Image (cartoon, rainbow, N blue to C red):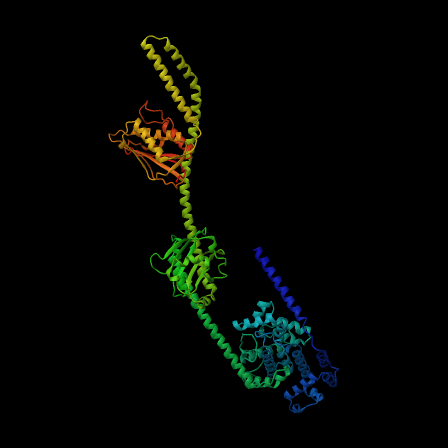
Amino acid sequence: MATSATTAAARQEGQTERVELILSQLEQLPTLPAVAVRVLQATTSAETDASDVVALIRADQSLTAKVLSLVQCSSVGAARNVTDLSRAVVLLGFSAVRNAVLSIQVFETIGACPSSGEDALNRTEFWKHSLAVACASQLIARESKSGVQPDEAFVCGLLHDLGKVALDVCLPKSYARIVKETELRQACICDVEKKLLGLDHTVAGKRLAKRWKLPEAVVECIWLHHQPPQTLPASLKAPKQVQIVHLADHIVRRQRIGYSGYSQKGDITALAAELGIGPDALEHITSAIAPEVEEHCGLVGLTELTSADLYADALGGANKELALLNSNLTSANRRLEVRSRCFDALQEFHGSLSAQDTLLDVCRVGAVCAKSALGLQREVVCFGLNQLKTICHLAGSTVLAGDSAVLAWKNETLIPAAPGNNLLVALPSTMESIVGQFDYLAGDEPIWLMSAGHDTKLVGGFVFQAPADVVEQLGAYPQELNALAGAVGLAVVTASVRSDSELLIEELADVNRRLSAAQDEALRSKSLRIIARMAAGAAHELNNPLAVISGRAQMLARGLIDENDVRSVTLIREQAQQASDIVSELLDFAKPEVPDSQTVSLQPWLEKFRAKWLKNSTLREADFELCIANPGIAARVDPDQLLRIFDALIANAVEAMTSEKPRLLINSASSPSDDTIVVMIEDNGVGMSPEVLEHAPDPFFSHRQAGRGRGLGLSRAHSLATRNGGRLWLESTEGGGSRAFVEFPSARMG
């Protein structure tokens, strides 16, 4: 809230500074000529004689001619043939002379400046309007019982829009823009001035009139002539003059004489009634304005005008205004049609989606709705990007099956233009991969892109073919199209987030599973390390007693003659040796040797291994099968430790096969290009229960009968596989045989 207040204050301060700068430029405008100032002073002084006024006017030949011309246009019958300035001043009176001099000098000082361009304020039309308001004000003053002198009302009406021409002189480019926007929007010129400049022509005119020390009535009419009578301040010095000019301005604008730029039209009958003017008198005033303008046109330097010219101009202005209104109406109808299509498309889009829809579903619905909103005959393709901007989902507006695609989205295909600023652009060359996915984008017409963004980032859009003029027309409705693009962009982001959330949930479940397995493995490894330390300590402590027992047994055997004694000593030696072998196995399990990794080609190595087991066991050729899918596979392992791993696994398998038809299979489907090599050993033995399978790799665990093993074979094989950078796992069902899988790093031999 504080930030908003600060921003508003800064904006207000900036606008105030701009207004002050504009007003300071008004101060640079030229002042009224000295002769005009002296005439004004002389005509307002009670001690001034007519000869003094005549002398001042006669000093300016141009002003003399203007005053004589004014006498010719006056309603004083005897004055129409007067050519002597003294006579003219007496007949007109000081008030009329003062007002005439003021009007003439103001026009010559500022009004005759040329226009700055085609779109600038048309000075001729501006002075036509000002002169018409002056004549109307004079007529109203004569008909009303306001007590206002007609000549004074004339000057007030003539100068009421002085601020417009002043702003046009000071700020020609800005005011040309104001005039153009006023005509295009048929708006009130005061509102446009206030919007673009921070002040309007009434304030500017008031400031300039005060600087020129114009009469108070003129200043107030310039400032408040747009105000209704009931809203005028009570402190005004000349409220009736303001009221007369207000009515005159409304009448002239209704007759469309000259350029006003003020579109508001009031009830002139009610305004006239407040001044005591009835309908008949109002009709007389209205009909007399054009002839009066014709008589006074020379006063402000206008060429000769006729009433017919004024009426023709008014008719032309009315036709022009009507044409502009028709054009605006056509444009409004077109915009309404586009808005209606976009609104219907948005309704259809939101109504066709559900919370479970995928990104591809959003693209399918978006393509159909975009085609309808854009009013296109050709098909439209809608695309949406996933959250990482790596995958692009595409769907077309046709209902044909398979009209969709999924593409990899590379960074170089991102569009540099921000969505919303350049909503419709030619399809960038980096996105041409989209075109090849759909046959109906293969025509000769240009291909366009309409961006769909979210949070100032591109997340999707529409691709379609259309003539350039059609796209140009669509570009005139950015708000409507942005609404559709924004809705699709939000739906794309929502679907992407939902999809990513589902993937994240699935990955989290997998991570939890692997974490649980890793925890079990860590616990098992910790247990093995503890057992290994215990085994190493026990082996170290047992070695010396066993050596003593074995040595003393050998010494006893040398002196014995009795066979029973010899057998007893021999048994002692054998059991001591067996205990020593157990100690060696414990040491080997506790502190295995560091692997000496080498490249081992598995096909020949396994063939030799198989031959050795066929020779040293009861297995027959048909019982032991070797099947290697790719003879070129090779592992990076320690050959000796590899032999011990496979010996332990084959020994377990042979012992488990109790049927008359044993079957042992060593199989590998690995490829030389794989990162790891997996070998499977399968038997048709008795299998293992789930409890046995779970504890099979544990050291000293054995479900066999007592005395048939120490339970270190699988544990040692598992440990050796891990030390060689691989792993070992088992699969088995009770009564259905067992499968042992051994994985090693691949040597990538060709």
Q: Quadrant of residue 227?
A: bottom right
Residue 484, given in percent of the width and then of the height, sits at: 44, 61
Residue 548, given in percent of the width and then of the height, sits at: 42, 14
Q: Quadrant of the C terminus?
A: top left
Q: Quadrant of residue 20?
A: bottom right
Residue 202 sits above or below residue 665 on the image: below
Residue 259, given in percent of the width and then of the height, sits at: 57, 77
> What number of labels is visible?
0
Residue 616 sits above or below residue 571 on the image: below
Q: Quadrant of the N terminus?
A: bottom right
Q: Is residue 116 left or right of residue 59?
A: left
Residue 127 seen in render: yes
Identify which residue is drawn at 68% across, 76% down.
Answer: 214
Query: Nearest the camera: 103 or 689?
Result: 689
Query: Nearest the camera: 612 or 294?
Result: 612
Residue 233 seen in render: no
Residue 281 sits above or below residue 340 on the image: below
Query: Nearest the camera: 381 or 627?
Result: 627
Query: Nearest the camera: 348 or 661?
Result: 661
Residue 609 sits above or below residue 6 on the image: above
Q: Is residue 252 left or right of residue 712?
A: right
Residue 357, given in percent of the width and then of the height, sits at: 38, 53
